[in-house]
Image (cartoon, coloured by chain):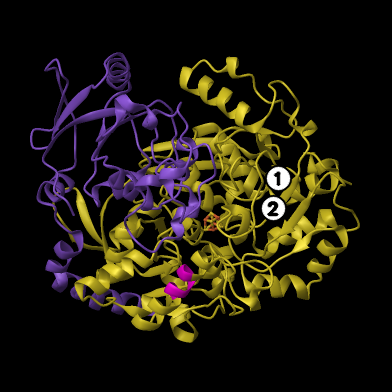
Amino acid sequence: MRTLYDKLWDSHVVRDNGDGTALIYIDRHLVHEVTSPQAFDGLRMAGRKPWRVNANLATPDHNVPTTQRAKGIADPISKIQVDTLDQNCAEFGITEFKMNDIRQGIVHVIGPEQGATLPGMTVVCGDSHTSTHGAFGALAFGIGTSEVEHALATQCLILKKSKSMLVRVDGQAGNGVTAKDIILAIIGKIGTAGGTGYAIEFGGEAIRALSMEGRMTLCNMAIEAGARAGMVAVDDTTINYVKGRPFAPKGAMWEQAVQSWRDLVSDAGAKFDSVVILNAADIQPQVTWGTSPEMVIGIDGKIPDPNSFADTVKREGASAALKYMGLQANVPISSVAIDKVFIGSCTNARIEDLRAAAAIAQGRQVAKNVKLAMVVPGSGLVKQQAEQEGLDKIFRDAGFEWRDPGCSMCLAMNADRLEPGERCASTSNRNFEGRQGQGGRTHLVSPAMAAAAAVQGHFVDVRDIK
Amino acid sequence: MQKFETLTGIVVPMDRANVDTDAIIPKQFLKSIKRSGFGPNLFDEWRYLDHGEPGMDNSKRKLNPEFVLNQPRYKGAQILLARENFGCGSSREHAPWALLDYGIRAIIAPSYADIFYNNCFKNGILPIVMDARTVDQLFNEVQANSGYQLTVDLPSQTVRTPKDHSVAFEVDGFRKHCLLHGLDDIGLTLEHVEDIRTYETKRKQAAPWLF
Ligand code: SF4
């Protein structure tokens, strides 16, 4: 009786090193411009070549501008980094969706979109949110640049097996409660280090009911719970999503693949090292109030009083967070006004996310106190699809800016950022100090909650927007 | 990679839990395509009073006198004492590069984020896990004694305090071996080329759509 994680691990062991580590084979390596240049340099210096060039897929995402892209990148340092990726991919023969390719986008959006992420694979990328791809019943995790070089050169990594955790969400999520709210509630419960050392499998009725977009949102933030990998077992939802995608198998090979993917579930009775259970019905739409994703409350909640934490570290953390965030204890979160809205990132910039936000924005106006509300699709293809559905028009009419795809204000490496003291309702995944710009204040929410905050000018329960 | 055997060095205390990699090296410095030169921007947002950007002359910037790295007593520190979940957040290896470039060769904390922990070993930095009580005690000692030094001995897996009190720590056999000899993982893996090829042949039969 094996867990999904056991099965994925076992099928990728090239060699047991006999010292607690194993050489694990990597099926897919995704590459972006920020964490790869030093790895390519390393290859060149050692006179090495990529082991299996077609296992790699690259795209620039962190540094790309989200406006007037045809004009190129204004920031010379960002430009060097993107040009370096282009040169490295050309030199080593790696497939790259360049900045002006319609298939370009955030690496964690394009992998699944292209069918480059498949069930049963090991997927790595020099980016912690690689956990996203676990939504497909894959073993996917972020690596550092040394490991990027290692994966390029050997198609393997030296790994130690993690412990296994099952996070089971029972019952049905209420109206207005999305995958984002579920994962924020999970992180609120287990903490940002709760999953450290574990590979998390998400299961239970509420998870099974999620679309692939929702499962990607969920697994995306497994890393915010401390787990390097998050995953969801394969079912019809997975298989229907993958079918027909450019890199997915076709014809007889498709049938063969589907047959083997059906086994990518934890066996009944498989043992996990740890089990956490939540009730979906208890989860409200969530808003973070602090500088760590675990500092989160339901929209009906009040900002906690640091003194209410028994643990000293938590108490000090909460007071420092309130100071940084410019917030008072015991104030209802729904009364907090915002300056900017960011709908985007590898957490929430897929078509379903944009549809959910547009449904709220439709026929409404961005509130006067909101200086900027921007929508940044996760990829060129998401953007195209949204435009075909008329979502861009809905957003524009409501006063949102409609941008080109990339990481954008999720981490503000390009020109999109918060100014000191600005408060943002953001659909991204990290609310760390300075994440969206120095001194910026980030509140993590779902796309619908972000759109609702945009039109009201403050946080509001999306279920109250009729 | 630089070898790590024993190290006696000044300890700098970073008294904050959940220090994330964005704090260790802010994103604007990730635009560099090099592995070195990150030291002056380690903890940039806490360390300087102005906003740092790549290409600035850091020696002309105003330091934040409150920040621990700027206090003269911790000058030249090689050991960082930290709180739980150190290095959480992004996978950027720029974080250990910045620490190393600054001169940090060992970290002592109750816990680390997984990717960061792993990245340290790849760069010749030894991240030591110690229980929260011992770490607490070390914080007290460091703060009470100017010029406080610890000796980290990897072969015997111990940390010695100035009073010759010795604390043992755990480290993975494979990682220890690589650190002690300054070994490059890629070279080690390429000793198993045959195993990789055998695996690929087998896998190609079982799951041809992956190739
Ligand atoms: S969208 Fe944000 S979290 Fe995702 S890869 Fe880009 S920077 Fe990282």
User: Could you tell me the amino acid type at mark 2?
Assistant: Phe
Q: Which residues are magenta?
A: A80-85
In contact (CB < 8 Å): disc 1 and disc 2: yes
Q: Residues within 10 Å of mark 1 (few under 14, many from 20)?
A: many
- Is B209 above or below relative to A179? below
The location of residue A181, given as percent across then percent down, is 65, 43
CA gap, disc 1 and disc 2: 6 Å
Q: Residue at x 53, y 62 (%)?
A: A62
Seen as rendered, the residue at the extreme front is B60
Q: Which residue is mark 1?
A: A425
Main secondary-structure element of the magenta-colored stretch: helix
**Which image quarter: residue B158?**
top left
Q: Residues within 10 Å of mark 2 (few under 14, many from 20)?
A: many
Chain name for mark 1: A
Q: Which chain is yellow?
A: A
Q: Secondary structure at mark 1?
A: strand
Q: Nearer the viewer, residue A395 or A353?
A: A395
Q: Secondary structure at mark 2?
A: strand
Disc 1 under 8 Å from ligand 1? The reply is no
* Quadrant containing ligand 1: bottom right
User: Could you tell me the amino acid type at mark 1?
Assistant: Ala
> If you read the primary sequence from the N terminus, does the residue marked by circle 1 or circle 2 appear first?
2
Q: Which residue is mark 2?
A: A342
Q: Which chain is purple?
A: B
Disc 2 under 8 Å from ligand 1? The reply is no
Number of marks in the image?
A: 2
- Is B57 above or below relative to B132? below
